[in-house]
Amino acid sequence: MKIVITGASRGIGKELLNHYQKKNEEVYGLSSKDCDLVHWDQTSCFFEQSNFNDIDLTIHCAASNVTRFFHKISFDTFKNMIDTNILGTFNLLKCVIPRLKRHGCVILFSSASAFSPRMGQAAYACCKSALHGLVKVLVQEMLAEEKYIFLIAPGMVETGMPMKMMSETALEKARNSIPMKRFCKIDEIISTIDFLQQTPYMTGQTIHVNGSYYVQ
């Protein structure tokens, strides 16, 4: 199986890269050092020069998150988050979708913040919410070629982005706000990805993996 994973230098992306490497899959882990997805010329050139045809699975983990009250967030910070989380996703999908094989799939990472945001998450919630509108259109367009797309909206993951940004006190408070009183394990993300790959009839859906922090 040929797999492309973005955001593979840290967090969820790195854990997924390690998982598929151990399974001896043909997996390519991309980081900003390989290709800055924000820039179309760089992204398109990278995919043209790489052997990324007939992709079975693309997992888009690359993201940017700055937690700041709206009245304190600068225009440049807000724009940088839009560039990374929305334009970067656009550029990736423009390159990846034509290179997916029949029955291949794309998995994008949204967030519980898109559905139940907290103070300071205006920019991040805005960016992640935008992915849902995009997928609602893409699922209709991709089905003509029997290609599939999904969203996973996790809460806090043990190896995820916020963990290194928060104090122990803040982590404990966050943990206690989750009905299951723990963070998501990477194995639960992996099993969700496996389920979606095996269930194409779920295409276009958002899977919430958050310990009942948010229930739709």
Image (tube, rainbow, N blue to C red):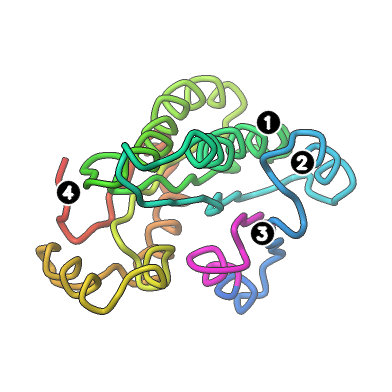
Q: Residue at x 74, y 45 (%)?
A: 54
Q: CA distance from mark 4 to mark 3?
A: 33 Å
Q: Which labelled disc corresponds to residue 43?
A: 2
Q: Which labelled disc corresponds to residue 1?
A: 3
Q: For the residue carrying disc 1, how many other residues have a C-alpha within 10 Å: few (<14), some (14-19), or many (20+)? A: some
Check the image and report above or below for 190 versus 98: below
- The foreground one among 95 and 89 is 89
Residue at the spot of label 1: 94
Horizontal side of 61 relative to 183 (left or right) equals right
Tags 1 and 4 touching, CB below 8 Å: no
Q: CA distance from mark 2 to mark 1?
A: 10 Å
Point out the stretch of residues depicted in magenta: 1-17
The kind of residue tagged 1 is Lys
Tags 3 and 1 touching, CB below 8 Å: no
Q: Which labelled disc corresponds to residue 214?
A: 4
Mark toward the viewer: 2 or 1:
2
The kind of residue tagged 2 is Thr
Tags 2 and 1 touching, CB below 8 Å: yes
